[in-house]
Image (spheres, rainbow, N blue to C red):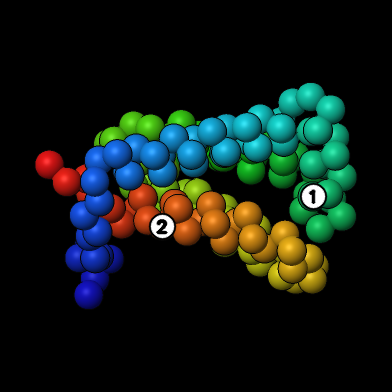
Amino acid sequence: MSVAEHKVIRLPRAVVWTCAIVLAVAFVLVGTSKMAGPSALRWAERLAHWGYPAGAGYVIGGLEILGGLGVLIPRARRVASATLMALMIGALCTHAVQREFPRLIPPLVLGGLAGLLYSSRPRP
């Protein structure tokens, strides 16, 4: 099966929108926290500790905000979901390498929701 022929899951429209709203809220809030306010400094310290370059928080935070907003736009939903899945794979790898096993749960859940949204089509 090629990428273009991926398995489509038919979900009720309410489920698709609930997933989109949950992802939007989570990623816009976390993305904003990486870019502004007192938590941005803490994120910068964490990212530096994990070996990421200076400014990585702005790139990651910006992608999280754009992906979070993108899942609310039906035409952009698949690209936004794929972006969020990629970010969550990066988070999983980071936490696994750092042996921060309890921190694997949020990216697993959010990445799973993004994957569900990526593979879904609302029922007519």
| Left or right for 102, reference 70 | right
Of callouts 2 and 1, the N-terminal one? 1
Q: Nearer the viewer, residue 28 or 124?
A: 124
Q: In the image, which is nearer the foreground, mark 2 or mark 1?
A: 2
Disc 1 crowd, CA 10 A, few/some/many (<14, 14-19, 20+): some
Q: Which residue is mark 2?
A: 115
Q: Nearer the viewer, residue 18 or 42?
A: 18
Q: Which mark is residue 47?
A: 1
Q: Which mark is residue 2?
A: none
Q: Residue at x 87, y 45 (%)?
A: 45
Q: Secondary structure at mark 1?
A: helix
Location of residue 119 in the rendering, given as x and y in whole percent from the top left corner: 31, 57
Q: Residue at x 81, y 33 (%)?
A: 39
Question: How far apart in space, not on screen, are marks 2 and 1 (Cα)?
Answer: 25 Å
Q: Secondary structure at mark 2?
A: helix
Is residue 76 visible in the rendered structure shown here? no
- Specify the quadrant of the image occupied by residue 61: top right
Amino acid type at mark 1 = Leu
Q: Residue at x 24, y 65 (%)?
A: 7
Q: Quadrant of the N terminus?
A: bottom left
